[in-house]
Amino acid sequence: MSGDIAFEKEIQRTISVDIRYIMFIIDKYAGAGHLINEMTIAPTHKEKMSPEDLLAAELENAENDPNIIVKELEMKEYLGTLVPVMDIHSFSSAFDLAVKQWGSSKDVKFWWRGNIYTTLKK
C-alpha cells in the first residue's frame, strides 16, 4: 500500500471499507450474528467511581508516571491553621492548582511567596 509514494497499477489494489458496513454484512446477510456477539467492540466500563476513588486512581497514575513529580506540600501555620505552601514559579499556576485541588472559596487559603491568598474567584 505504497500508493502515497508511487502507484503501480499492475500490482496494487486497495479496497477501503468502513468496518461498520462489514459488521452489518456479517450480521444481516451472512447470518453470522454470533461472530459479532463474540467480538469485544468496546470495553465495558465499571460502575462510576466516587470522587475519592477517582482522586486515588489519579494519584496512583501520577506516582507511576516518570514525567510527573509528586511531592508532599510543605505546610505553614497561619492564624492557628495549617495552609499549603505553593512553591510554583507563577501566581496563576499556584492559584489554578489550588483551585483544582481544593475548589474556589474564600475559606480555602494557600501560601505563595510569603503571602496568604484565597482560592475565591472574582
Image (cartoon, helix red, strand yellow):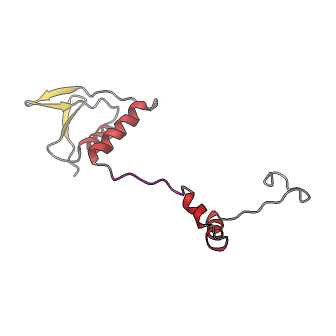
Q: Give the camera-side residue of 49 and 104.
A: 49
The residue drawn where x is 17% and y is 26% is 76
**Residue 122 in the figure: left or right of residue 90:** left
**Residue 32 in the figure: left or right of residue 93:** right
Say whether residue 3 is magenta.
Answer: no
In the displayed structure, 67 sits above or below 9; it is: above
**Residue 96 in the figure: left or right of residue 43:** left
Give the residue furthest to the right: 10
Quadrant of the rendered structure where residue 61 is? top left
Q: Give the camera-side residue of 122 and 106.
A: 106
Q: Position of residue 75 (x, y in %)?
A: 20, 27
Magenta region: 41-48
Say whether residue 42 is magenta.
Answer: yes
In the displayed structure, 95 sits above or below 6; it is: above
Dominant SS type (magenta): loop
Q: Give the camera-side residue of 69 and 29.
A: 29
Q: Position of residue 102 (x, y in %)?
A: 23, 42
Give the residue furthest to the bottom: 29
Quadrant of the rendered structure where residue 22 is? bottom right
